[in-house]
Amino acid sequence: MDHFKAVEQFLTYLGISKGASEHTIKAYRLDLLFFLNFVGDEELSKRTIRRFLGHLHEKKASTQTILRRLSCLRSFYKYAIREGLTDKNPVEEIESPRKEKRLPISVTYEQVKHLLNQPDTSSYLGFRDRAMMELFYSSGLRLSEVAYLNRHDFDIHGKILNIFGKGKKQRQAPITDTAAGWLTQYLEHPEREEKDSKAIFLNRWGKRLTPRSIDRNFASYLKASGLSLRITPHTIRHTIATHWLENGMDLKTIQMLLGHTSLATTTIYTHVSSKLKRKVYDKTHPRAHTTSD
């Protein structure tokens, strides 16, 4: 098999049959060419793949990078066998390294307040951004969930949002009085002009604000805040989940509010909060408050 020719056929297949984006195709091309340039004229075998993985380890590639490149090779050889380009799959039976479990980052309430105060609410767009940021912390919404909120999703009187999350799964999310106040005032703002009558959050031209724009605006406020941490809207989602837990909310309720399919996903927050661990320790240890015998 001419591997370089097969790679181009595979990339064409991804674009036409699978509808892969240019970004995805470019990433696959880089990973596959990196592999082929590494092996050179060597006959491909399981030993070759193991040597390649060993090389990645030596170069201190992250587990995520190794998993991505291995997945890329699996997809390529699966395609090559199906198309009759080869009858050998050197990736077969190669075990994937265990994915690293990264603990979510959370920040303090004081840092959240400092960030929330960054938008200039005397301007219409600043007022909009403050309303969005309040929602992130109020209900732990994902960036895309905020971007695609519609007016009819907001129950003003009940202070409830109807959210369409991952996999188009619907849930209800209560919001704080503070967040509801900002959101209501934003929807009634005298400078609000709507070309999209459904969307809640609009750009300066009255059309729905995109997730990318929200992310970019958030990053500018982070820079203005002077906070050195890498904080994103998703960090705020992790933060409110941690704060809920620290203040006594049970995991099942947090799971429901965040829209997690599995409770195991929510359980990770128990590893984040050292404050919670201390509270539990002091509450449950028989001698936690004993100073002497």
Image (spheres, helix red, strand yellow):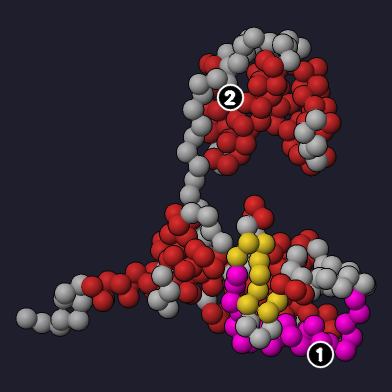
Marks 1,2: beta carbons within 8 A: no
Q: Nearer the viewer, mark 1 or mark 2?
A: 1
Residue at the location (82% across, 67% down)?
A: 209
Amino acid marked by disc 1: Ser
Query: What is the span of residues highlighted in magenta in the rendered image?
Result: 172-194
Judging depth in this view, the residue of 120 and 175 nearest the camera is 175
Crowding near pointer 1: few (<14 within 10 Å), some, many (20+)? few
Q: From this viewpoint, is residue 4 visible?
A: no
Crowding near pointer 2: few (<14 within 10 Å), some, many (20+)? some
49 left or right of 187? left
* Residue hosting label 2: 52
Q: Residue 65 location in percent, x, y? A: 61, 39
Judging depth in this view, the residue of 178 and 293 nearest the camera is 178
Residue at the location (62% across, 36% down)?
A: 68
Q: Is residue 271 magenta?
A: no
Quadrant location, the N terminus? top right
* Residue hosting label 1: 122
User: Looking at the rendering, which quadrant does residue 268 occupy?
Assistant: bottom left
Helix, strand or loop for disc 2: helix
Q: Residue 116 location in percent, x, y? A: 66, 81
Indicate whether 94 appears above or below 133. above
Q: Is residue 193 magenta?
A: yes
Earlier sequence position, callout 1 versus callout 2: 2
